[in-house]
Amino acid sequence: MKHLAIIASILSISGCASQAPQEVDTSSSSDVTAYSFGIEAGKTVKAGLEDKYIDKDLFLLGVHDAIKGNNLRYSLTPEEISAAHNEHNIWATEKKEEEALIAGEKNAQEGSSFIESYSSREGVRSLDSGILYTVLSAGDGASHPTAEDTVEVHYEGRLIDGTVFDSSVERGEPVSIELERVIEGWREAITHMSEGDKWEVVIPSRLAYGTQGRPPAIEPNKTLIFQIELLKIAEEG
């Protein structure tokens, strides 16, 4: 979808604030106060400005002109501002959906290739669903958890390129999880494990986060790798 002329006009602006930032005089309480207020305001704005399609320099230019009372480089009525925001949001949503579709197709192909390669490694086993796993160490537990159980685990989640996206090991604390509330691939793998087992598990995207992914860490159709250590099956009651 084409942008409104308003959007095009705004994005055609170039340049930055006319004055370079001055140094903060740390001996001046007013300087320190003003700068600290700016830091806090900036953090708040940054947290709410995760839209990668917004030009941050132009955004700051608009803030600068408004705060300094400069003549605005492009004057907008409240109605025009609202229309511009709505149009941008529609465009950005469509753009994100398009990018997600392209990424999803690429990730699906890469995942299939990885699974085919991984399945030929020594010691790799498979479950009926297509989950692959390698037993890194075997525990001495005799029982398996059910899909309704709560278990205590240590884990590390990686993408197929080795990027770690989550790790209880890094945090230094195991987690207690209800198997009814986790992705299907986790539930199936863990219900085949015994207490004390440590597995490396490769989960196809359809048993993980599927076509939706879990942005920003996990894109659509990502095959995931987990090292999972089943520490304990929680006792009922």
Image (cartoon, rainbow, N blue to C red):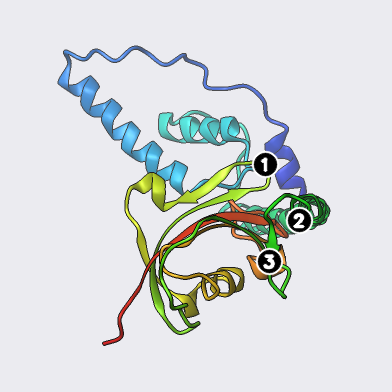
The residue beneath circle 1 is: 161
- Label 2, secondary structure: give it: helix
The residue positioned 71% from the left and 46% from the top of the image is 6
The residue positioned 66% from the left and 70% from the top of the image is 207
CA distance for labels 3 and 2: 10 Å
Q: Nearer the viewer, mark 3 or mark 2?
A: 2
Give above or below for 12 relative to 157.
Answer: above
**In the figure, is residue 195 to the left or right of 13?**
left
The residue beneath circle 2 is: 119
Residue 198 in view (yes/no): yes
**In the figure, is residue 75 to the left or right of 12?**
left
Q: Callout 2: 10 Å neighbours few (<14), some, many (20+)? A: some
Give above or below for 148 relative to 19.
Answer: below
Q: Nearer the viewer, mark 1 or mark 2?
A: 2
Figure quadrant of residue 36: top left
Identify the amino acid type marked 3: Ile
- Label 3, secondary structure: give it: loop
Identify the amino acid type marked 1: Asp
CA distance for labels 1 and 2: 16 Å
Q: Residue 131's mark?
A: 3
Residue 203, horizontal then vertical, whole percent: 66, 62
Residue 132, horizontal then vertical, whole percent: 68, 62
If you read the primary sequence from the N terminus, does the residue marked by circle 3 or circle 2 appear first? 2
